[in-house]
Amino acid sequence: MRPLLALAPLVPPIAASAGIARRLDRPQPTLTFDDGPHPEGTPRVLDALDARGTKAIFFVIGEQVERWPELAAEIERRGHELAIHGYRHRVQARLSVAAVKRDLERAVEVIGPTAHLHRPPLGVYSEAGLAAVRERGLEPLLWSRWGKDWRRLTTPQRIAARATRALGPGEVILLHDADHYSSKDSWQRTLAALPEILAAAQPTGSGSESTSIGVSAASQPK
Ligand SMILES: [Zn+2]
């Protein structure tokens, strides 16, 4: 048991030593949206991404995909990647080994076999959870930048400033298109922050060129 694994989202060397990627091997930063789909948040975020021609990764929750399967299908239809965040939004460290595995199996069943990336709730892997994810052939991915957009007392300006600070190639930005597990209507602040984040994440000199992504682009941790 490596109890320090819980600190991987905050301490990059711990993520690296556990072989958990925080970046992707691609020239531009990548936006990722956790906790959806959400009946209001997801469509608005999809429209904002379309307006910039940017592709993102959506780490969805199985129980929400069951409520809104058409939204999950829409994410893929518009060229974004669906990834696994869990069946329920429960912290792995608080679950038994059997419960962690059950949750993962159910998530894969509901979200679909094309999903390739995995990120646990709060970014916290248990030893058993990380092993189960790898056995399943999934690749763990945390993040290197976040907007802390789940907070009740934040603003779009603060979200954008935090998410885009010293943004470089391959950065992975954590955002949320849903408020199922965070403060109410938090997705609205995220949405308001998006134009600034998208502008900062655009590769320089590429104009409106699509930043298309492929699952094969995931890299070893840096
Ligand atoms: Zn989450």
Image: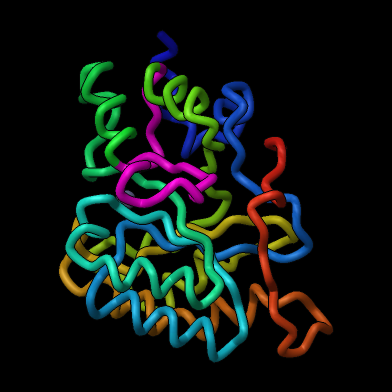
The relative height of residue 74 versus residue 20 in the rendered view (above or below) is: below
The relative height of residue 168 versus residue 6 in the rendered view (above or below) is: below
Please report the residue visible at 35 percent of the width from the left and 56 percent of the height from the top: 60
Magenta stretch? 107-127
The front one of 72 and 154 is: 72
Please report the residue visible at 31 percent of the width from the left and 42 percent of the height from the top: 107
Residue 182 image point, x, y percent: 21, 59
Please report the residue visible at 20 percent of the width from the left and 52 percent of the height from the top: 63
Which quarter of the figure has residue 200? bottom right
Please report the residue visible at 46 percent of the width from the left and 58 percent of the height from the top: 82
The relative height of residue 13 versus residue 46 in the rendered view (above or below) is: above
Placement of the N terminus among the 4 image quadrants: top left
The front one of 172 and 55 is: 55
From the viewer's perspective, is 117 left or right of 184? right
The residue at the far right in this view is: 205
From the viewer's perspective, is 114 left or right of 38? right
The front one of 192 and 50 is: 50
Placement of the C terminus among the 4 image quadrants: top right
Numbered label tally: 0
Residue 150 image point, x, y percent: 29, 61
Instruction: Specify whether residue 122 is painted magenta.
Output: yes
What scheme was used to colour the molecule? rainbow
From the viewer's perspective, is 1 left or right of 30? left
Instruction: Specify whether residue 84 is painted magenta.
Output: no
The relative height of residue 141 versus residue 178 in the rendered view (above or below) is: above
Residue 137 image point, x, y percent: 54, 31
Residue 104 image point, x, y percent: 33, 34
